[in-house]
Image (spheres, rainbow, N blue to C red):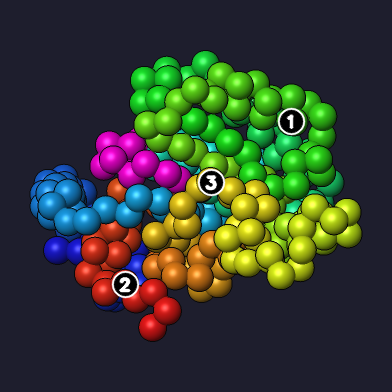
Amino acid sequence: MESEAPCHGAGVVVPLKTLLRRAGGLLLYPIYRAYQWRLERGVRKGPLPGHIGLILDGNRRFARSLGISSNEAHRSGASKLEEVLEWCWDLGIRIVTVYAFSAENFNRPSEEVKALMSMFEEKFREVSKDERVHRNRVRVRAIGKTDLLPENVRDAIAVAEAATKEYSDYQLNVAVGYGGRLEIVEACRKIAYKVSQGLLDASQVSEDLIRSHLYTDGIPDPDLIVRTSGEERLSGFLLWQSAYSELYFCESYWPEFRKIDFLRAIRTFQHRERRFGA
């Protein structure tokens, strides 16, 4: 029985909350848990993505649906990310890149941006002391045009990166102040400067050279990108790197994203025939 919010690739299903109201939560809950257990067992037997990208979308619409502030919703989203990261680590997904804040998000209301920056500072500082991060040996990196961020956020990022720089079992990349087009433009500027200085010849410009000048230099491209909230676009997320990524779009708002949604995304990835250049 599929009882979660419908996700593309999983078919049309009845939302869990509706079923709970109809049948009585105590009666349905064991069935739901049994389905999740069966789904997870099957997922563990298949090939897993080495790198998953997460577009954390829908916080503000989640806020409107509940009549709460956007700041409360963003904090709910931050808590959800911590939960989802543990799911990834438990499955052995080694690299996770999350789209936390785009360069365009600076155009949002100033009070919302200020609150988000305060939360980013807080969370990056927490990461440096997080027992789960150290237990799993997770390297934390911020990717994006970080000089756009306030100094206190940049300082917190530096603390988190320094505290985890020796780790290599897992990696968490936080795209903050990030834009996919901006990333490519920045890479082109760096290469153009080297050509102008005689350090490179234009004939040496290649895909590998451009890749080495991206924010994600040294990080494998994502195998799977998941976006919540029902929107079906990348919105500038890892435009170069996602050329051959599998894409999965889920209806749930990010704070409502459940483990069963996550497992369905992985299952869909496992059932697809990956084609590179075809």
Going by the numbered disc 1, the residue's amino acid type is: Val
Instruction: Report the quarter where the N terminus lies.
Output: bottom left
**Location of mark 1 (residue):** 153
- Quarter of the image where one finds residue 151: top right
- Neighbourhood count class around disc 2 (C-alpha, 10 Å): few under 14, some 14–19, many 20 upward: few
Q: CA distance from mark 2 to mark 3?
A: 22 Å
Going by the numbered disc 3, the residue's amino acid type is: Gly
Residue lying furthest right? 196
Q: Please, is residue 168 above or below residue 12 in the view?
A: above
- Quarter of the image where one finds residue 82: top left
Judging depth in this view, the residue of 14 and 201 nearest the camera is 201
Image marks 1 and 3: residues in contact by CB distance under 8 Å = no
Question: Does the magenta segment cover residue 96?
Answer: yes
Evaluate whether residue 187 shows in this view.
yes
Question: Who comes first in sequence, dot 1 or dot 3?
Answer: 1
Question: Does the magenta segment cover residue 104?
Answer: no
The numbered disc on residue 218 is: 3
Report x, y in % for residue 149: 79, 39
Instruction: Report the quarter where the C terminus lies.
Output: bottom left
- Neighbourhood count class around disc 1 (C-alpha, 10 Å): few under 14, some 14–19, many 20 upward: many
Q: Which residues are magenta?
A: 86-97
Judging depth in this view, the residue of 214 and 236 nearest the camera is 214
Q: Is residue 78 left or right of residue 257?
A: right
**Location of mark 2 (residue):** 274
- Neighbourhood count class around disc 3 (C-alpha, 10 Å): few under 14, some 14–19, many 20 upward: few
Q: Please, is residue 29 above or below residue 187 in the view?
A: above
What residue sits 54% from the left and 25% below the top?
165
Q: Is residue 235 left or right of residue 53?
A: right
